[in-house]
């Protein structure tokens, strides 16, 4: 995206590093619009578009649009429609309209639903409170051009490269009640002393969040490190000339310039909290204490259970929450772009 | 991963299948409708070929089935085109698989889910086959192979069994007697605890093993008929009878291995192997974990003790695997021949040589090559008045996986909250069973 804006005619939207890291959902359109401008520029005013241009443009705009509509809009709308039905997934004639029953059942009868909502929120709060400041701290330290900086960066960033499923699997070995690392070290793998990190609902969410934070810290560190690299060294110099100490410089000079990075961090963390799934699914399949909305959707729809209507209702709840978060963000971004 | 047990997982189900399951889930997430296209082998109606969808993805059963098909080819001149899928993936995709272009014959399990597909028209009746193979099977197996309409839909091949497994050497060392009544069982648990053993090994991380414990306690307490009604969604979970069953469970729960919800069944089996636990209420496939020959020879089992003298030990949980005929087989004549062959004692014997944790479904199969454990399992099944499958084979899978599995995990941790738990189960059950 940044590449296309650079080659643009000068009227293209100025893309911040922020929007580059988190492409807005209508990305394909942006690209084609920009490319359209690029194609048009050398032709000047003499004539508008050749037939070939038009075909190319049509394909470039059309194919992504068709794919987008099919894979995003149609499926989303189908899920919303199915949320008001009951369907076992066998033949379209077995779809039955039930109105709001699925939601009623979900809100009043499902013992896992409200805990799942709560856990998604806890997930977000914990990620914001622990790994994010920790990532910022690490980024600030690594930004000081200390020795072996690259080694540390790699080490902290490594968990982000691993797939969530692998992380879940590794931590599950650490937490295993009988053979796991922790219980063996503290002698809690004997009858009468068991600490059930995976099964105990008072513990397991925190166990899994430690694993999630372990990964998230590295992610946040890289985002902040990129942000810090963009801070004008003159600001630091000026601040030290004014006699500010290190903490004051960071608080009053550096941190305010990281505003854009903070927005990205917030969005990334919200996304992480809403899509939390794979880690827990591998860890304990969302047993009591670690229920998540995404896991409830999966358990109801995938596999033999095939409560497709009911599962779709949960998916709709997840969609509504996502929209409630993403719409204010998009409005704010567009407003900023218009101003710029 | 959503590990469906259906009473008998494949060996070493835990790690690989977790990752595979993720893959499967990802594929499913990509588009459920697309999957129906992945079924079928795509071969046109070749009168010399029968296609077969198999869930026997592990090496040992895969090889055993290949031998059976080779024997069939020799006998009939028809080739079997096998389309093998990962065991768990096969189960998760079964709905779309059967609606798409399924193979002529496919692997499945006896019980409610078989009848469900039969009632939905996704399987063809095979009464003709049963006219020829009927004599090979005991009455209980015949009943298991029928749909709700009374027609046959299923050819059983092998059966496992749930019971209380123990090591003979441990019982000998401490002078324990096999308990046959509830009081004896409780007394034995107390004694084992005193001797520093974990009375019952237990792991319910996969969420289905506890279903097996409930089955045993429920049909011993309330009898087979009530168990069937409960599984069919007819009897109420708030019935005092269910509460009594849970009270019994709560009585022996303190003698179960702690931290069960965080432990896999394989790890629980290790406790029995290492002689730290005295007993393990589980399926006979626990034998697959006994990789050392001497340990395996030391393994024995007894049927869960009597709780109510009106029912004694008359019911045995014996999950049965076999084959079904798809809705519109391309080579029906060949498929029927194959099913007929699969229902013969020869086919069963070839298969059973591969896995000593199972016994033949047929009563004509030669039992002389059985291990002592297989002989005992066979006698127990043959002597049973009633056979059950397993909760997730006997009831609706949506009910067992989304309601019962989390509910029983909760019970194991907090047996005191049983009343509100049962009310919640009953409320959710009503909604699920109301949606046809």
Image (cartoon, rainbow, N blue to C red):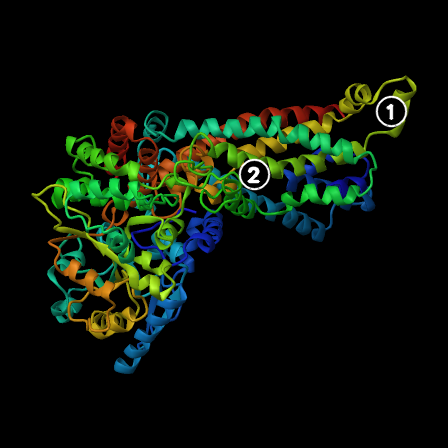
Q: Which mark is residue B300?
A: none
Residue B328 in view, yes or no: yes
Residue placed most toward the observer, B286 or B334: B286
Residue A102's spot in the image, x, y percent? 34, 31
Residue with the most extreme left position: B310
Evaluate whether residue B141 shows in this view. no
Subunit of mark 1? Answer: A
State if disc 2 and disc 1 touch (CB < 8 Å).
no
In the image: residue B390, left or right of residue A16 = left
* Residue at x 61%, y 38% (from the top left corner): A214
Residue wearing tag 2: A211
Who's the residue at 46% across and 51% down the image?
A: B18
Earlier residue among tags 1 and 2: 2
Residue A329 position within the rendered picture, expressed as x and y whole percent measured from the top left: 62, 26
| Number of callouts | 2
Q: Residues within 10 Å of mark 2 (few under 14, many from 20)?
A: some
Residue A309 lies, in percent from the top left, at 36, 38
Horizontally, residue B143 falls left or right of residue A108, namely left
Residue wearing tag 1: A235
Residue A129 picture location, percent across and down:
61, 26
The residue at 27%/26% (across/down) is: B420
Residues tagged by mark 1 and mark 2 found on one chain of the structure: yes
- Find residue A213 and report its image quarter: top right
Image quadrant containing the C terminus of chain A:
top right
Q: Nearer the viewer, mark 1 or mark 2?
A: 2
């Amino acid at each position: 995206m940044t590449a296309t804006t650079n080659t643009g005619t000068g009227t293209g939207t100025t893309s911040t590093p922020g929007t580059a890291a988190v492409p807005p959902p209508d990305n394909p359109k942006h690209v084609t619009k920009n490319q359209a401008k690029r194609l048009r520029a050398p032709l000047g005013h003499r004539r508008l578009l050749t037939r070939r241009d038009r075909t190319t443009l049509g394909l470039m705009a059309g194919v992504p649009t068709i794919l987008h509509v099919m894979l995003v809009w149609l499926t989303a709308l189908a899920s919303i429609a199915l949320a008001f039905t009951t369907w076992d997934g066998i033949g379209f004639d077995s779809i039955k309209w039930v109105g709001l029953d699925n939601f009623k059942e979900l809100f009043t009868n499902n013992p896992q639903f409200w805990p799942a909502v709560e856990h998604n929120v806890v997930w977000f709060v914990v990620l914001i409170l622990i790994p994010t400041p920790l990532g910022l701290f690490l980024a600030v330290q690594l930004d000081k051009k200390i020795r072996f900086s690259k080694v540390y960066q790699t080490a902290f960033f490594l968990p982000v490269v691993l797939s969530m499923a692998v992380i879940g699997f590794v931590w599950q070995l650490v937490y295993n009640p009988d053979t796991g690392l922790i219980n063996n070290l503290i002698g809690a793998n004997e009858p009468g002393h068991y600490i059930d990190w995976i099964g105990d609902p008072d513990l397991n969410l925190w166990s899994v969040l430690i694993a999630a934070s372990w990964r998230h810290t590295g992610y946040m560190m890289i985002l902040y490190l990129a942000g810090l690299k963009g801070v004008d060294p003159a600001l630091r110099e000026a601040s030290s000339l004014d006699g500010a100490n290190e903490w004051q410089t960071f608080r009053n000079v550096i941190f305010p310039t990281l505003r854009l990075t903070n927005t990205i961090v917030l969005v990334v963390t919200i996304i992480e909290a809403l899509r939390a799934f794979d880690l827990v699914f591998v860890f304990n399949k969302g047993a009591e204490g670690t229920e998540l909305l995404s896991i409830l959707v999966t358990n109801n729809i995938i596999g033999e259970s095939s409560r497709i209507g009911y599962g779709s209702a949960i998916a709709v709840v997840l969609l509504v929450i996502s929209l409630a978060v993403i719409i204010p963000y998009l409005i704010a971004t567009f407003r900023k772009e218009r101003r710029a | 991963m959503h590990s469906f047990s259906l009473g008998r997982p494949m060996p070493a189900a835990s790690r690989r299948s977790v990752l595979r399951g993720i893959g499967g889930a990802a594929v499913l997430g990509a588009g459920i409708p697309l999957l129906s296209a992945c079924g079928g082998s795509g071969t046109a109606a070749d009168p010399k070929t029968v296609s077969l969808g198999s869930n026997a993805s592990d090496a040992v059963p895969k090889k055993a089935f290949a031998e059976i098909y080779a024997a069939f080819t020799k006998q009939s001149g028809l080739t079997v085109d096998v389309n093998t899928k990962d065991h768990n993936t096969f189960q998760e995709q079964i709905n779309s698989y059967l609606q798409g272009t399924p193979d002529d014959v496919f692997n499945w399990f006896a019980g409610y889910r078989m009848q469900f597909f039969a009632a939905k028209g996704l399987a063809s009746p095979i009464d003709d086959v049963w006219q020829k193979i009927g004599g090979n099977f005991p009455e209980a197996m015949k009943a298991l192979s029928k749909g709700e309409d009374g027609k046959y839909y299923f050819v059983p091949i092998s059966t496992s069994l749930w019971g209380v497994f123990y090591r003979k050497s441990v019982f000998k060392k401490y002078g324990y007697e096999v308990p046959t009544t509830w009081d004896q069982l409780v007394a034995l648990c107390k004694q084992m605890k005193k001797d520093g053993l974990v009375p019952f090994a237990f792991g319910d991380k996969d969420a289905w093993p506890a279903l097996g414990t409930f089955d045993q306690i429920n049909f011993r307490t309330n009898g087979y008929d009530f168990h069937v009604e409960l599984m069919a969604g007819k009897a109420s979970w708030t019935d005092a009878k269910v509460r009594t069953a849970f009270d019994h469970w709560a009585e022996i729960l303190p003698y179960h291995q702690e931290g069960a919800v965080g432990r896999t069944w394989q790890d629980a089996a290790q406790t029995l192997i290492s002689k730290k636990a005295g007993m393990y209420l589980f399926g006979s496939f626990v034998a697959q974990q006994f990789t050392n020959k001497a340990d395996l020879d030391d393994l024995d089992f007894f049927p869960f003790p009597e709780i109510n003298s009106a029912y004694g030990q008359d019911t045995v949980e014996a999950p049965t695997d076999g084959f079904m005929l798809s809705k519109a087989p391309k080579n029906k004549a060949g498929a029927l021949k194959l099913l007929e062959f699969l229902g013969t004692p020869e086919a069963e014997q070839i298969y059973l040589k591969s896995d000593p944790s199972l016994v033949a479904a047929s009563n004509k199969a030669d039992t002389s090559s059985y291990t002592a454990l297989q002989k005992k399992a066979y006698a127990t099944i043959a002597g049973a008045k009633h056979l059950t499958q397993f909760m997730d084979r006997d009831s609706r899978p949506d009910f067992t996986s989304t309601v019962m599995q989390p509910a029983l995990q909760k019970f194991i941790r907090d047996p005191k909250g049983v009343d509100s738990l049962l009310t919640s189960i009953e409320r959710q059950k009503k909604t699920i069973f109301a949606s046809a």
